[in-house]
Image (spheres, rainbow, N blue to C red):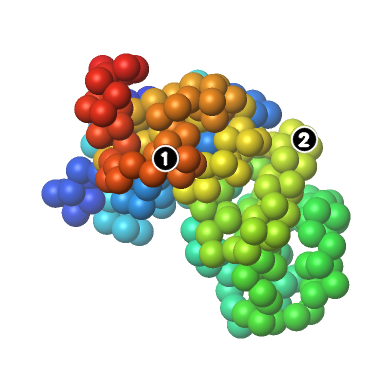
């Protein structure tokens, strides 16, 4: 199990971004983390994957555990070797290199399984196999997102962290990415899915968390979140009300109907 416990993150010793959040990703499950821009979703993923240092961020409280063992003080490479891999927001592929070379770079911590994982990625993304020698920068946005996910899979992760995989994609491509995430999960990989597309995320997740201004304001089974009136109004766009914050829905207009 991947566990985040009472995590607090500060940038540049000044900006408090995460305010004691806790969540779990059980083995073989999909967990969705929802929230608006600036809520702290990407910061949480950076903390799990050990990338805070690159952005001058520090964990000042709490811990992250994998199967009960702390990993929040480990290097990113060590975390990947233990089975936690991330596909970054914005794809972050190496545009001047080929598709094949990008995938091989993803296997730098697990070269023994490179051939097996390459076959797995090409089975999941046949279009990448057809473009294996193509320059990655010339791929479409959807193909680049597939490459980013495929590269993360090259390390044989037990847990895959996905940061806004549907960002900037057409509806048809969003559906394809959704189906691929489901298939990856069926193959035994747990998924922590960070998304603004709440409908897509909750339609495939087992459990969901809602993050706002660095705090978890709600967590329930995904099916219950889909049916929750407040979530439907604020995140699924099923209300005509001009609401600027989920906190306003929760604490004011709904009269603290849930979670005080």
Which quarter of the figure has residue 159? Answer: top right
Q: Name the one closer to the observer, 6 or 219.
A: 219
Q: Which residue is depicted at the point 25% across and 20% down? A: 255
Task: Look at the image and tell me whether residue 71 can be seen.
Answer: no
User: Which disc is residue 9 wearing?
Assistant: none
- Answer left or right for 74 relative to 10: right
Mark 1 Cα shell of 10 Å, populated few (<14), some (14-19), many (≥20): few
Q: Which residue is depicted at the point 69% across and 52% down? A: 175
What is the residue that sits farthest to the left in this orientation? 14
Residue wearing tag 2: 186
* Earlier residue among tags 2 and 1: 2
Indicate the position of residue 71 as horizontal and vertical percent values: 45, 34
Indicate the position of residue 172 as horizontal and vertical percent values: 70, 59
Residue 48 vertical placement versus 21 (above, below): below
Quadrant location of the C terminus in the rendered image: top left
- Answer left or right for 120 relative to 33: right
Q: Which residue is depicted at the point 23% across and 51% down? A: 11
Residue 184 vertical placement versus 23 (above, below): below
Count all numbered tags in the image, as a single digit.
Answer: 2
Residue wearing tag 1: 239
Mark 2 Cα shell of 10 Å, populated few (<14), some (14-19), many (≥20): few
Indicate the position of residue 38 as horizontal and vertical percent values: 31, 51
Which quarter of the figure has residue 82? Answer: top right
Q: Which residue is depicted at the point 36% across and 52% down? A: 37
Q: Name the one closer to the observer, 235 or 94.
A: 235
Residue 67 vertical placement versus 72 (above, below): above
Q: CA distance from mark 2 to mark 1?
A: 34 Å
Indicate the position of residue 39 as horizontal and vertical percent values: 33, 45
Q: Name the one closer to the observer, 13 or 212.
A: 212
Query: Which of the two discs, 2 and 1, sits closer to the camera?
Result: 1
């Amino acid at each position: 199990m991947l566990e985040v416990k009472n995590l607090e993150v500060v940038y540049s010793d000044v900006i408090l971004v995460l305010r004691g959040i806790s969540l779990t990703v059980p083995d073989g499950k999909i967990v969705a983390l929802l929230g608006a821009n600036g809520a702290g979703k990407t910061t949480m993923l950076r903390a799990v994957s050990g990338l805070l240092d690159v952005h001058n961020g520090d964990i000042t409280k709490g811990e992250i555990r994998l199967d009960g063992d702390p990993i929040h003080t480990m290097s990113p490479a060590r975390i990947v070797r233990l089975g936690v891999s991330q596909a970054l927001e914005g794809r972050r592929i190496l545009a001047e290199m080929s598709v094949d070379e990008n995938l091989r770079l993803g296997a730098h911590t697990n070269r023994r399984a490179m051939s097996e994982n390459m076959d797995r990625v090409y089975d999941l993304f046949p279009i990448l196999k057809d473009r294996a020698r193509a320059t990655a920068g010339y791929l479409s946005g959807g193909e680049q997102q597939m490459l980013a996910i495929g590269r993360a899979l090259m390390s044989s992760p037990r847990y895959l962290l996905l940061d806004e995989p549907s960002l900037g994609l057409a509806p048809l491509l969003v559906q394809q990415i959704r189906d691929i995430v489901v298939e990856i999960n069926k193959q035994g990989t747990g998924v922590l899915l960070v998304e603004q597309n709440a409908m897509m995320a909750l339609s495939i997740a087992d459990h969901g968390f809602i993050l706002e201004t660095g705090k978890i304001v709600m967590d329930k089974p995904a099916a219950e979140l889909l049916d929750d009136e407040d979530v439907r109004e604020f995140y699924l766009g099923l209300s005509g009300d001009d609401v600027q914050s989920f906190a306003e829905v929760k604490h004011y207009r709904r009269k603290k109907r849930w979670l005080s």
